[in-house]
Amino acid sequence: MGVYPISKALQIANELELDLVEISPKAQPPVCKIMEYKKFLYEQKKREKAMKAKATKVIVKEIRFGPQTDDHDYEFKKRHAEKFLKDGAKLKAYVFFKGRSIVYKDQGEILLLRLAQELEEYGKVEQMPKLEGKRMTMFIAPKNTKK
């Protein structure tokens, strides 16, 4: 239409039985449109939903070990870890120390570093093994993400 002062724009909106919607309040002068407010809200929600759908969702999968996890269990869990990384999920591998098993924290760290080394072709270590209370945690991010 054109550039009008607020009073004139309100008058035009009332004559057309529509709403005066402020599109960009920070602009100088503020930008307004004459339209149906409900339609404006609907289109805004639709745009937000489309943006949300395009945003990538990060999935974090967890694998738990004990400090004395035997080879068979380790291999079994490693295969799951490979699958998670191939699917594009982040991996949180942790060793949980029960009771007095905290004295084996070096074994837990060796276990996690071994896992990181064997999963090198599927993902890279995002956070090295770190002891937090009774858990030693390590994060591995996938190298190539599927879409």
Image (cartoon, rainbow, N blue to C red):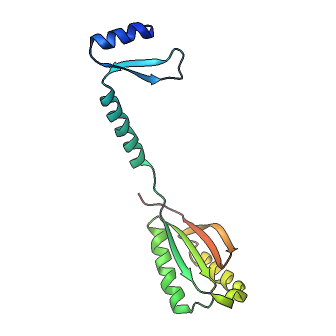
Up-down: is 93 above or below 147? below
Examine the image and state in which quarter residue 135 appears.
bottom right
- Can residue 82 be spotted in the picture? yes
Examine the image and state in which quarter residue 37 appears.
top left
Q: Residue at x 29, y 18 (%)?
A: 18
- Can residue 3 be spotted in the picture? no
Q: Quadrant of the N terminus?
A: top left
Image coordinates for residue 57, horizontal then vertical, percent? 46, 56
Q: Residue at x 42, y 18 (%)?
A: 32
Q: Residue at x 37, y 35 (%)?
A: 44
Residue 19 horizontal side relative to residue 61, left or right: left
Image label count = 0
Residue 93 horizontal side relative to residue 145, left or right: right
Q: Nearer the viewer, residue 64 or 16?
A: 16
Image coordinates for residue 109, horizontal then vertical, percent? 68, 80
Q: Nearer the viewer, residue 131 or 82?
A: 131
Residue 12 horizontal side relative to residue 57, left or right: left
Q: Quadrant of the C terminus?
A: bottom left
Residue 80 horizontal side relative to residue 118, left or right: left
Up-down: is 50 above or below 6? below
Image coordinates for residue 16, horizontal then vertical, percent? 27, 13
Up-down: is 147 above or below 51? below
